[in-house]
Image (tube, rainbow, N blue to C red):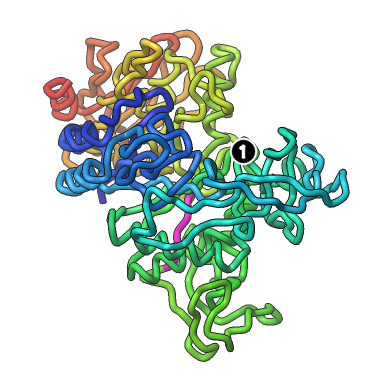
Amino acid sequence: MENKTIIQFFEWYLPSDGTLWEKAEACAADLKNTGITSVWLPPAYKGAAGVSSVGYDVYDLYDLGEFDQKGSVRTKYGTLDQYLAAVRALHAAGLEVYADIVFNQMMGADETEKITAVDTRPTDREEQISGPHEIEAWTKFTFPGRGGKYSDHTWDKNNFSGTDFDQSTGAKGIFLFDGKRWNQETDSENVNFDYLMGVDLDTDEPDTYKALTDWGSWYFDTVHPDGLRLDAVKHMSFDFYRRWLRFMREREGRDFFAVGEYWSGDLKKLLHYLDVVVDGMPERTLPPRPQKSSGGCWQKADESAPGTDQPDHSAQTQAGVIVPDSDEPIQPVADGTPLTLFDVPLHYSFLRAAQNGQNFDMRSLFTDTLVEARPECAVTFIDNHDTEPGQALESYIPEWFKPIAYSMILLRESGIPCVFYGDYYGVESANESPILDLKKLIRIRSRYAYGPQTDYFDDHSIVGFTRNGDAEHPDSGLAVLATAGAEGTKYMKLGPAFAGKNLRDALGRHNDPVRLDEQGGGVFHVHGGYVSVWLTEPAYNDIRIHF
């Protein structure tokens, strides 16, 4: 099996020139040759900011750069035709395409509506701090520029639970609409962190849920993505994506990859989300209750646990979804329904290591991270569009530490690594260059980072690991040594199969080889504040030829 590597193919500050889809098409072969297997593309639909929209201010899910809305036909990234051409080119190169899905909020409504609402306390969204009063909210989405093509569904106040702006008075706050409540299973920050921005989708509303499954069906038929990145899952009812993903997978007749963005550095919160969404919550609309498989992010259909309340399936529709009679349970496609999460705690661990340098205990680098606790559910990353300077979640890893960090997610056994566009191509607006040796590390992962792993996290400053290689990948196996402090050495073993072989530093910091003893061990060296990756001589020569 080949190692999987994702690239996030955008960053926040890309120019609004409509060329990203064309670039994705042109770069497909290069990405594949470097060792990338999967490409995460940004939200493709029209945002409220038109050509300036990065994609998270959702206006019209059905407008993929085809209709004259919000001041333009194209999106920031290009037109519908360019988008579909990019997807076809990526597929032709043998790459998977992951679509970015944003369902929590909408913005840029076409009309306002009068709504009775109550004010809620920003720090405790469950506490109402006013009586009912009328506000004027931007909640009516009619999409006049699209004219009902693909879908005649329009959105109104019934599809939403709250907003933060009263047009009639100019007042700002967090307004909960009359007859609504915030989703009850969300992140506990601010007691209930359902509301994020714009107008908040009420995913418990049957019409809303049906509109999103209808759109998903159209989108898969139109674009044919291989997987999904799910935005802001901590702000949505925890069972929503369980229901929606299962609906889509059964409709598609296949399992597909999905990764959720649950932005929290608290591992317990990520594990709770996985426990609920992946392992434990009964379906509201689709029977039967899945049971946790043996230690994974996969669940299998089985009989309900004794005493578990199951939904009533006597009606033909529930929450807008067609369901079978109770004696015809839906079986999941293939082996089950996987869901992964971005390993935010690991990102913050890298940040602390970079900020503290030689004072950071490198032995703790993976402590309380998702990749340590549930490696099969972890998508590891260094930075993304939200952590860039100037963004709300700014926590950018300093450049000097990034080669170390990337070696720790690209060359180890556990987790699925996601490479950031700004690290791969640079950030033009900030005059930041591509990260040194990143493409080398991706190719090393693709070809040589295989076999059992042995950790040497036994020193405060200098840590390393080895991979023993496997028969399926010629010349595979490696040794990695890294430090955030001063230079040093460490004895590490790859195993007797490597006895007598020479290993060379593929990152070019050391000219002399390390000759391994009869146990396949040797003394490896690393310069201060850097990482060295030692490969067999044939693998080393391959890296030198290509880079």
Q: Nearer the viewer, residue 125 or 454?
A: 125
- Which residue is drawn at the image coordinates 42% and 38% (left, top)? 70
In the rendering, at what x and y percent does residue 542 appear?
A: 14, 27
Q: Over which residues does the magenta segment extend? A: 336-340
Question: Left or right: 55 with respect to 469?
Answer: right
Residue on which the image places disc 1: 264
Visible in this render: residue 471?
no
Of 55 and 460, the residue lying toward us: 55
Whether residue 491 appears in this view of the structure is yes
- Residue 493 appears left or right of 246: left
Residue drawn at x 43%, y 15% is: 399
Q: Looking at this view, name the residue that lies furthest to the bottom.
A: 327
Q: Position of residue 483 (x, y in %)?
A: 46, 17
Query: Vertically, is 270 above or below 425?
Result: below
Whether 365 is drawn above or below 3: the answer is: above
What secondary structure prevails in the magenta region? loop
Q: Which residue is at a point 61% across and 64% down the rendered structure image?
A: 205
Question: Dividing the picture into quarters, in which one does residue 420 lie?
Answer: top left
Q: 53 or 454: which is nearer to us?
A: 53
Q: How packed is label 1: few (under 14 Cα within 10 Å), some, or many (20 or more)?
A: some
Please state the horizontal and vertical placement of residue 428, each as a whole percent of the image: 34, 16
Q: What is the three-letter code of the residue carrying label 1?
A: Ser
The verdict on residue 415 being magenta is: no
At x 63% / y 60%, what residue is drawn?
Answer: 158
Which picture quadrant has residue 36? Answer: top left
